[in-house]
Amino acid sequence: MNKLKKIKPGWGIVPIAVFLAIWEMVARLNLIPGHFFFPPFSTVVAEFYYLTVNGVLGRNFLSSLARVLIGFSTGSIAGLLVGTIMGWKDVANKALSPIVSLLYPIPALGWLPLLMLWLGVGEALPITIIFICSFFPIAYNTATGIRTVDKNYIQVARTLGASDMKILTTVVIPLALPNIFTGLRLESGMAWRVIIAAEMVAIPTGIGALMMRAESLIRMDIIIVCLIVLAVMCFSFEKLFTVLETKLTSQWG
Amino acid sequence: MPSIKLEKISKYICQNINLEILDKELLVLLGPNGAGKSTLLNIIAGLVEYKGSVFFDGESVDKLPASKRKIGYLFQELNLFPHLNVASNIAYSLRVQKQFRSEVEARVEGLLQVMKIEHLSSRYPRHLSGGEKQRVALARALALAPDVLLLDEPLSSLDAQASKYLRTELRQLQKKLGVTTIYVTHDLTEAEEMADRIAVIENGHIEQVGRAKEVFFYPMSKKVSDFIGAPNILDCTYCHSLGKGVAEVGCGGLPIIIPDGGNTVKRIALLPRDIYISETKVPGPDVNRFKGIITGIDSTDETVGLKLKAGENKLTAEMSHHIFEDMNLAVGKEVFLILKLRRIRAYEDKEQVKENV
């Protein structure tokens, strides 16, 4: 255990390097039958460079990124607000909980056919899908986090002269942060998974759409480039919230 | 600081409670677990709804929420805010009242000094010991200079030594600040050391209110007697001060050393649990160590009571079942008794006590 702790963070890249080397070797030596469908890593890198230089990757990436940022930020802000109200006020919880509980389990892509008819195939469609994908889980996690704050802290704050609003903002929300961040972290990655899926099915631009065009041209290298971009973005978004959570709660959490 | 009056208070187990706490007094609310002690504190704090009336200095506070009652409340679990460091915990009430930053800083600094915790100001609660947490929680409760201080078994999580030390400090601080205080405990020793007066609460009823000695010598009901433990009361034939805060009294032919410097002690009392029994002579000076004969054995669910004759005195001692079973005790057997010096209560004038009751 102690030996494990001493390993420096930079060493995490070693397994990835080994994996890429094996990939390159297997593809180059034609060790897999039907190797046509399995390009070497160096080809993927070359294609990544080409797609970046000619602007195709950047254009599609920015389309997906904008949709994720707008959909996720509006969905999470709305989720935080509704979740806070549900967690803090019993009346709101009783009124909204059945609706949230009923809609929460529906997969975000399940809304796609209905939204295509309601909104048409435009920018509003993927943004709305991401909004829905973010809103329910974040509202649910926020409400749970706020409801599970130890009531004794609220009593203490009350005896110390704090109003309900002060108690909410200075005690309850800070103590609910670990739960809130769990929702934000998971859904930030989920937003990328959902946008790619939505673009593959119904939207003509974005990383998902690029993947579908590559599939029709039998361009495995482009598909893999897109998958790597997706993996990096999911990881980066989740990591961002992990770092934020650690920064805000590590001293006391 | 206000006097507090509870009139016909009812909530949960507490039924029709009337109680008066005097200005600047420290009243100990003493009773077993589940007796309604914490409920009563929550009622005074305004944290629960209740029937009846609470008065601070004759003014009803029933309509005031907890945040407006000017109380400092030290909860049993202390409940320091885990996301705030020590200084911010103490400053919490001042900040929510929107006091000027300079005033807040000065007040926090002062409280850190009074509680001797200046070195902890930037630490978070999870890095504090039990005693340190207790001090921080007390400082936080005192930050707004409350009119009333409510302490709900604040020392119960500490070891005996730390608890005793902090009890002394707490008592000194309470006297210095002159804040009307209600201190909840189920510990008789704690109650005796802290209280101006003790209110014994049992099953939601105030059974008796009085000074420690009054409650101890003259329990007014069987419930109080059962909870306190009926003491051994011995009349003294003589009393000589030995200086340094101790005296020798003669009781039923036995010379007993007591923790009282006076020459006028007429009677002493000792709880059964404060008489130590041994089958063999215990090493050490022959102070408060006597031979006795077992004259009877009474067993209850929790303890075993031994009736003893020592000199001309009839005494009762108490021990746990497992200790009794480890010893070979029987009626008629000679045993050795040690009377625990610091647990002996001395009493000078019976009539004076009656008046107080």
Image: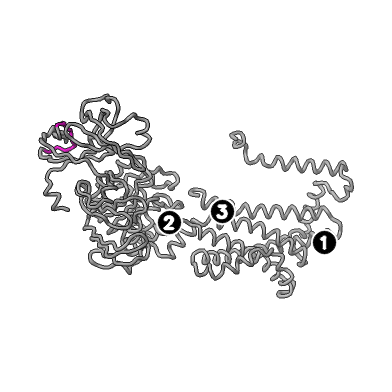
The spot of residue B254 in percent (x, y) is 16, 31
Which circle, 1 or 2, is nearer the viewer? 2
Mark nearer the N terminus (1 vs 2): 2
- What amino acid is at disc 1? Arg
Residue B142 shows in this picture: no
Q: Is residue A185 magenta?
A: no
> Secondary structure beneath disc 2?
helix
Q: Mark 3 belongs to which subunit? A: A
For this view, does B91 lie left or right of residue A5?
Answer: left
Q: Is residue A102 visible?
A: yes
Q: Which residue is mark 1?
A: A213
Q: Which residue is mark 3?
A: A244
Proximity of marks 3 and 2: CB atoms separated by less than 8 Å: no
Residue B265 versus residue A116: which sits nearer the camera?
B265
Q: Estimate how packed mark 2 is, as few (under 14), some (14 to 19) or many (20 or more) residues with alpha carbons within 10 Å.
A: many
User: Label 2, on which residue?
Assistant: A153
Q: Please, is residue B223 above or below residue A96 in the view?
A: above
